[in-house]
């Protein structure tokens, strides 16, 4: 088996070791072998990106537009093949994998358009005879560190704006999912960018990621991953000399409120999709289902019935609704939390069992806990698996209070037919994204994505708002002639 290599300064580069990428639906299936970079590889990539910055930061917008469009178009043209690779290495179902690939392509196409819309402002000065111009400039080398749960979309939504606004990139994908990252990087490396503008270094967070964070030549870090890693990256970037700009997307414990007046079918679909699709491995997953008393019994009965009909199986198989958990350590975390929930006195109303399928894989049936309190660990800590808590609420006010009683603030949803409650919830939910009668997960690519409280830090990602992170503002004064 040949090893997929890193891409540094336009060249393929060996790493210091090799990572075997395993299919979580079938652990006998090796997806491929991927180079694992060393600290020296990370430094070489940073050096290449630094050298390329002078040219790329001054590149014309037509050139950026063409490169980004070419990348987006190739991703979409290869959606079936790349979707299959993604599902094979990460374990989300094939339709979810193909959908994610299309999303990645759309993101590049969106930023191809944004490259043509770079704009500044020209104002009269408050002082006579002066003009003032406000423009945006790229930051320099940006370090992009991504998690395993969206192996192509998250890299896309960091890389596309970075390149669009004239930065050069060092990219480190998550260890578990180098396949999609490599395929994306290969497409990028054939799009006509000058050597060194984009560099891929696969490898460990503590080696490659840490090298990005320690380097004086990296101006900014955009990270998506766990809260603990995010906090440690933030502390290092603020303490660095010079300080680094940071953009952090971390955990969630997203509430989906279901009110008495909700349409039951809509509420059940929002809960199933939000809590369990993509195996619950989304930072926007609805892991807390907060249900008012008048609909509680009916909702739990209908949701349990719906869960019985879901097929948990090989991600690539036709008819699978929920693929496997990504790997053994995540599966252990999920089953540990299921044990914690039981011990805390929550009722396991459905699932939570390890399943055997024709191939060995990390199969877990969706776990629904009922009669939970918002104080239980399963209602407070991010599990990142197909596990959800149903929490009873007295009324709307109580439900809103419970929804906001969390350290996180990424996405918050409500199912109701009341304009009064939906309007109030949109204003008072302490979250970066609010969903009314739609799942907490599932967003558009042309609008901002991000949260507040412990979920996120720094400017928003995606859409035109991405420029807040990927550029720095310059104000120029000119004495008029
Ligand atoms: P998870 O694996 O649960 O998504 P992590 O925060 O562990 O969350 O990982 C997210 C990304 O951060 C991965 O690419 C990982 O390799 C990287 N990473 C982990 N630890 C560090 C670190 N100390 N410095 C930089 N990057 C890291």
Image (spheres, helix red, strand yellow):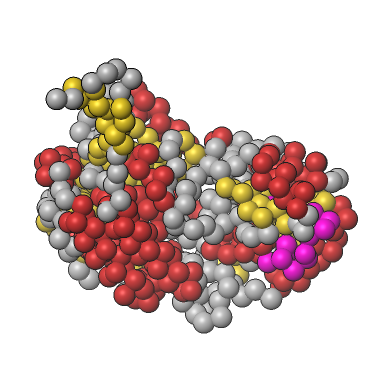
The region drawn magenta spans 256-269
Q: Position of residue 200 (x, y in %)?
A: 23, 52
Q: Can residue 393 be seen by looking at this rendering?
A: yes
Where does the image place residue 226, in percent across and percent down from the top left?
47, 43
Identify the residue at image location x=75%, y=53%.
419
Please give the name of the residue rendered at 56% of the width and 62% of the height, measured from the top-left corner.
Answer: 279
Q: Is residue 264 inside the magenta stretch?
A: yes
Q: Residue at x 62, y 64 (%)?
A: 273
In the displayed structure, does residue 220 sit left or right of residue 439?
left
Q: Identify the image quadrant of the C terminus.
A: top left
The outermost residue toward the right is 294
Position of residue 107 relative to residue 163, above or below, is below
Return the x and y of residue 183 as percentages of the image width and height: 28, 65
Picture quarter containing residue 431?
top right
327 horizontally vs 65: left or right: right
- Check the picture and name the quadrant holding the N terminus: bottom left
Which one is nearer the viewer's eye here, 169 or 468?
468
Dividing the picture into quadrants, the one containing residue 41 is top left
State left or right for residue 355 relative to residue 78: right
């Amino acid at each position: 088996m040949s090893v997929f290599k890193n891409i540094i300064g336009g060249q393929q580069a060996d790493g210091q070791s090799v990572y075997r990428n395993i299919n979580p639906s079938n652990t006998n299936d090796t997806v491929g072998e991927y180079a694992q970079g060393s600290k020296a590889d990370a430094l070489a990539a940073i050096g290449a990106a630094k050298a390329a910055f002078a040219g790329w930061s001054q590149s014309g917008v037509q050139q950026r537009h063409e490169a980004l469009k070419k990348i987006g178009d190739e991703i979409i043209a290869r959606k079936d093949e790349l979707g299959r690779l993604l599902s094979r290495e990460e374990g989300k179902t094939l339709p979810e994998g193909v959908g994610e690939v299309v999303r990645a392509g759309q993101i590049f196409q969106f930023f191809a358009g944004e490259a043509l819309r770079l704009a500044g402002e020209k104002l009269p000065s408050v002082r006579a005879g002066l003009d003032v111009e406000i423009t945006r400039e790229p930051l320099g080398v940006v370090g992009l560190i991504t998690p395993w749960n969206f192996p192509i979309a998250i890299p896309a939504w960091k890389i596309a704006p970075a390149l669009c606004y004239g930065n050069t990139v060092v990219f480190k994908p998550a260890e578990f999912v180098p396949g999609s990252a490599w395929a994306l990087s290969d497409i990028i490396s054939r799009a006509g960018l000058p050597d060194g503008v984009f560099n891929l270094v696969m490898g460990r967070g503590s080696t490659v990621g840490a090298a990005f964070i320690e380097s004086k030549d990296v101006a900014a870090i955009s990270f998506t991953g766990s809260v603990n890693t995010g906090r440690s990256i933030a502390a290092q970037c603020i303490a660095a000399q010079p300080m680094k700009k940071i953009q952090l997307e971390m955990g969630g414990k997203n509430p989906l409120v279901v009110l008495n007046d909700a349409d039951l079918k809509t509420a059940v679909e929002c809960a199933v999709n939000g809590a369990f699709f993509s195996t619950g491995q989304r930072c926007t997953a609805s892991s807390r289902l907060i249900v008012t008393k008048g609909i509680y019994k009916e909702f739990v009965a209908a949701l349990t019935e719906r869960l019985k009909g879901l097929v948990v199986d090989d991600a690539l198989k036709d008819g699978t609704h929920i693929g496997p958990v990504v790997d053994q350590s995540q599966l252990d975390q999920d089953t540990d939390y299921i044990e914690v929930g039981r011990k805390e006195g929550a009722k396991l109303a459905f699932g939570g069992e390890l399943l055997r399928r024709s191939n060995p894989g990390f199969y877990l049936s969706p776990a629904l806990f009922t009669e939970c309190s918002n104080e239980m660990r399963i209602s407070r800590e991010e599990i990142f698996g197909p596990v959800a808590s149903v929490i009873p609420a007295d009324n709307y006010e109580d439900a809103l209070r419970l929804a906001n009683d969390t350290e996180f603030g990424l996405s918050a949803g409500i199912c109701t037919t009341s304009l009064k409650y939906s309007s109030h919830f949109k204003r008072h939910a302490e979250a970066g994204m609010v969903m009314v009668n739609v799942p907490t997960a599932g967003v558009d690519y042309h609008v901002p994505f991000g949260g507040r409280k412990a979920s996120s830090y720094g400017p928003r990602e995606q859409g035109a708002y991405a420029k807040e992170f990927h550029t720095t503002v310059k104000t120029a004064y000119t004495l008029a002639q």
